[in-house]
Image (cartoon, rainbow, N blue to C red):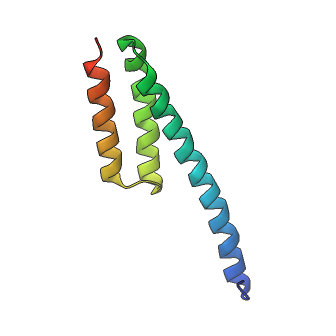
Amino acid sequence: MANHKATKKDVRQATKRRERNRYYGKTTRNAIRDLKAVTDKSAAGEKVTDVISMIDRLAKRGVIHKNKASNLKSKLTKRVNALA
C-alpha cells in the first residue's frame, strides 16, 4: 500500500475512475446488445443514434480506443441498414 499522502489520494481517484469507466462501458455494451436484438428498421434507426453517441463518449473519455469506436459504429450502421 502507498505511504505518501498524494499516492493514497491517487489510489482513491483511480478506483473511482475505474468504477465509473466500468459502468459506462457496461451500459454501452448492453445498449449495443439491445440494438442488435431489434428487428424493426425504424426502431433500430432511432436507437442507433443514441448508441453511437454513447460509443463516441467512451472514446472521448479514453475508455475505448477511437479506432475501436469507429469499428463498432461502422458495424452497427451496416447492421441497421441491412434490416428489411
* Residue 49, position as x, y percentages in the image: 40, 28
Q: Give me the residue at 69% from left, 82% from top.
A: 6
**Residue 71 left/right relative to 11:** left
- Residue 43 lies left or right of residue 19; in this view the side is left
Q: How many marks?
A: 0
**Which residue occupies the extreme bottom position in the image?**
3
Residue, x 43% and y 36% (percent of image)? 53
In the rendered image, the vertical position of residue 4 relative to residue 14, given as above or below: below
User: In the rendered view, would you say 80 is above or below 11?
Assistant: above
Quarter holding residue 47? top left
Residue beneath the point at 52% across and 47% down: 25
Instruction: Name the image quarter holding residue 16.
Output: bottom right
Q: Locate residue 82: give its quadrant.
A: top left
Q: Relative to the observer, which residue lies in front, 34 or 4?
A: 34
Where's residue 60, x and y in %? Answer: 43, 52
| Residue at screen point 72% across, 83% down | 1
- Where is 15 relative to 24, above or below? below
Which quarter of the figure is the C terminus placed in? Answer: top left
